[in-house]
Amino acid sequence: MDDNFLQSLNLSFFAYNKKGGARSNKKLIPIHKFLSEVVAKKLGKEYGVKSLGVEDGKEASVEGRYYPKNLDIAVYKGDKIIATISFKFVTSNYKQNANNYFEGLMGETANSRRSGIGFAHLLVLRARTPYYSKNKGNLRGKEVKSEIITEKDLQKYVKLYRDTDFPHKPDLIGICIIDFANGNKAYFVDLDTTNFSNETKKLLRTDFSLQTFMKKFVHLAKLKS
């Protein structure tokens, strides 16, 4: 699974670079398709999975508790959506947007969970994330510096994971720390080379890992059906 996941990230990253910016959803198709196919295979034919790259190639839309929302990867049984994966792949300018990402996640979580939909969030971060100057239209600006993901950047997610079961807490959280060799080949970063605490490293290797996340998401979907 890990190798196929990395390959889908390679394709997504290639699409991102080819378009020259982060706004196009073309960069999401390979990774959404991969996640959907893994989930569909593990759940079996009595369930359906809808996302970019599968079925009609469109995201499922729900009313939500507070506002209508398109879902990244939606699992349904019959005509009822029962669980969703919210996917975030940050390719640039993470630190200036980090709090907005996190606050948006909590709102998105409550909107789905309060509607009875199981909610899981998978976050992919680059260990060294390029920072680009202000975008012009759909074109990114010049690379100014490289930002290193630190313990502080991850602590908000660790605290959310450890929080009591409020509607703003996802049912599941997955976090993958990756980078690109030779500019375009994804690999999982050796966590021992980072400044993360031992507790955070352990979470990234166990509860937050891709393998654990996918296994628990399939279980969540079955519980919700």
Image: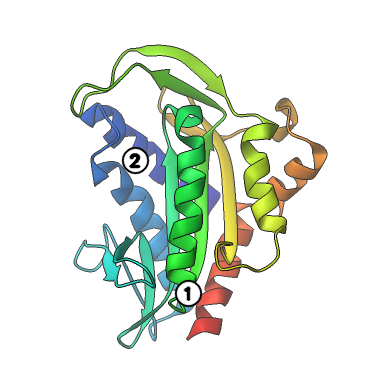
Q: Position of residue 47 (x, y in %)?
A: 39, 81
For residue 223, side relative to residue 183 (left or right):
right
CA gap, disc 2 and disc 1? 31 Å
User: In the current view of this chain or complex, which residue is farthest to the right?
Assistant: 198
Identity, as a three-letter code, of the amino acid under mark 1: Arg
Residue 6 visible in rendering: no
Q: Residues within 10 Å of mark 1 (few under 14, many from 20)?
A: some
Q: Residue at x 38, y 14 (%)?
A: 143
Residue at image point 63% right, 48% down = 157
Q: Residue at x 27, y 29 (%)?
A: 21
Residue at which label 2 appears? 12
User: For the residue labelled by badge 1, is the local secondary structure a helix, a strand or a loop?
Assistant: loop
Q: Residue 97 appears in which quarter of the rendering?
A: top left
Circle 2 — which element? Answer: helix
Which of pointers 2 and 1 lies earlier in the amino acid sequence? Answer: 2
Residue under label 1: 114
Q: In screen coordinates, is 195 left or right of 78?
A: right
